[in-house]
Image (spheres, helix red, strand yellow):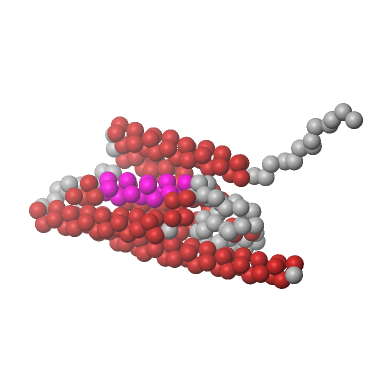
């Protein structure tokens, strides 16, 4: 009976693992489609940067802005369809960052501005999407147990030996590093472009928000570590 129960549990765990793999692949496909769309919009936007635009060109920019809004909705639909994203504090933060950045791009392009912060914001969208895709890739070799097991996401549940999270801690850590790289690249680009105090202040706000995410994730991971067993107090015999 015990062997039968063990075999049934192993089959259940394997089925759950396959289901989580399927979900990750579906989410990655959605991110890849979003990245492809953003790369195309970025390339078209670049043709309008750095020069005075006529009425027809401003209309073309507004069309590009509408495509960014469609993309914004598509990315938000991924978060809605897969609640595991919301349960992962780092992935949820990345989605919020995408949403805010796409709103700024829409504002810039709708106002006829293809330069300034617009290309930096578009680069951020591309980097964050690439980071999300890479973070959900299984390890190339070696310790897949670190990916498929071990606690829930930073904001989610999950138990050792129980249902495995779609977004494991190692994916959150990788995404956090990707976000840190994006902020570094953005900070350097803002400085090199000399975009002024408001752009510099915005980058500073992004740095502080990301630092808070890093602290929160580290705290969550520490809480998931098994507590050491302590010997009971000795009593008087």
Q: For the stretch drawn in magenta, what is the main secondary structure?
A: helix
Q: Residue at x 26, y 58 (%)?
A: 70
Q: Position of residue 107 (x, y in %)?
A: 22, 46
Quadrant location of the N terminus? Answer: bottom right
| Residue 90 forms part of the magenta stretch | yes
Q: Position of residue 4 (x, y in %)?
A: 71, 71
For residue 125, side relative to residue 230 (left or right):
left
Q: Is residue 192 above or below residue 66?
A: above
Q: Residue at x 22, y 54 (%)?
A: 65
Q: Position of residue 176 (x, y in %)?
A: 49, 47
Q: Quadrant of residue 85?
A: bottom left
Q: Position of residue 208 (x, y in %)?
A: 43, 35
- Give whichever of 10, 127 is nearer the camera: 10
Q: Residue at x 37, y 46 (%)?
A: 97
Outermost residue toward the top in this view: 236
- Give whichever of 145, 36 is nearer the camera: 145
Q: Is residue 149 above or below residue 10?
A: above
For residue 54, side relative to residue 202 (left or right):
left
Outermost residue toward the left in this view: 55
Is residue 191 in sight in this rendering?
Answer: no
What segment carries the magenta color? 89-105
| Residue 39 forms part of the magenta stretch | no
Q: Is residue 236 above or below residue 169?
A: above
Q: Is residue 105 above or below residue 12?
A: above
Q: How many marks?
A: 0
For residue 161, side relative to residue 65 (left or right):
right
Quadrant location of the C terminus? Answer: top right
């Amino acid at each position: 009976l015990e062997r039968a129960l063990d075999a049934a549990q192993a089959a259940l765990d394997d089925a759950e693992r396959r289901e989580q793999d399927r979900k990750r692949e579906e989410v990655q496909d959605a991110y890849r489609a979003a990245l492809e769309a953003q790369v195309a919009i970025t390339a078209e936007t670049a043709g309008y940067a750095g020069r005075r635009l006529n009425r027809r060109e401003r209309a073309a920019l507004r069309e590009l802005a509408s495509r960014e809004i469609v993309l914004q909705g598509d990315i938000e639909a991924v978060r809605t369809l897969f609640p595991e994203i919301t349960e992962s504090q780092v992935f949820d933060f990345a989605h919020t960052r995408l949403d805010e950045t796409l709103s700024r791009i829409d504002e810039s392009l709708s106002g006829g501005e293809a330069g300034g912060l617009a290309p930096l914001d578009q680069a951020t969208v591309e980097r964050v999407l690439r980071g999300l895709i890479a973070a959900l890739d299984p390890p190339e070799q070696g310790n897949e147990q670190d990916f498929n097991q071990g606690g829930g996401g930073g904001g989610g549940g999950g138990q050792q030996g129980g249902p495995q999270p779609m977004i494991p801690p190692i994916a959150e850590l990788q995404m956090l590093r990707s976000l840190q790289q994006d902020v570094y690249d953005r900070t350097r680009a803002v400085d090199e472009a000399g975009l002024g105090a408001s752009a510099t202040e915005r980058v500073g706000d992004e740095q502080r928000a990301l630092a808070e995410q890093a602290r929160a994730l580290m705290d969550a991971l520490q809480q998931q570590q098994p507590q050491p067993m302590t010997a009971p107090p000795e009593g008087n015999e």
